[in-house]
Amino acid sequence: MLRVKAFVCSIYVIQEFLHRYFVKRAAGDEIINPIQSARMVTSESFSFTYGTIEVRAKMPKGDWIWPAIWMKPTDNLYGNWPRSGEIDIVETKGNANFSCDGNPNGRQLAGSTLHWGPDPSQDKWRLSHWEK
């Protein structure tokens, strides 16, 4: 028999700003299989300094997945994250009709963000985040 605990939508306050995280924590017999994850890393095979990038991608559908396309630095010249930056080309959720506190936040929303700042507690992502 599969036992699944109710999902709790939580909002965590981080420093001086609100950032929404939607987390389902599971362990042992609470894990619903199959859960698959993939990461493609090209830092040792491809990098560029200037130019544009064009991506054509089909974002996967499915509950509790967070499909994303990120660009991270090959070398952390200015220090650990977020000092050397990160470009989130696109991030979305896999859930079709997910909402939290009455706000839609499922597959119908996608966002793009630049992460930068002196340390994780001062990540300036809110100044460069776009969502539609």
Image (tube, rainbow, N blue to C red):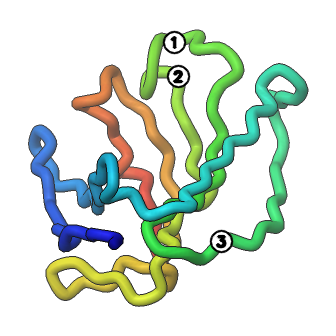
Find the distance from the CA under tag 2 to the CA under tag 1: 5 Å
Instruction: Name above or below for residue 85 compared with residue 102.
Output: above
Left or right of residue 6: residue 69: right
Q: Amino acid at mark 2?
A: Ser
Find the distance from the CA under tag 2 to the CA under tag 3: 29 Å
Q: Are marks 3 and 1 in contact (CB under 8 Å)?
A: no
Q: Amino acid at mark 1?
A: Tyr
Q: Are marks 2 and 1 in contact (CB under 8 Å)?
A: yes
Between disc 3 and disc 1, whose residue precedes?
3
- Report which residue position mark 3 lands on: 60
Between disc 2 and disc 1, whose residue precedes?
1
Judging from the image, what secondary structure is the residue with disc 2 in? loop
- Report which residue position mark 1 lands on: 78
Given this view, does label 3 or label 1 mark the residue nearer the observer? 3
Q: Are marks 2 and 3 in contact (CB under 8 Å)?
A: no
- Report which residue position mark 2 lands on: 84
Count how many numbered circles sit on residues in the image. 3
Judging from the image, what secondary structure is the residue with disc 1 in? loop
Where residue 122 appears, as percent x and y from the top left, is 25, 31
Where residue 60 appears, as percent x and y from the top left, is 65, 71
Q: Amino acid at mark 3?
A: Pro
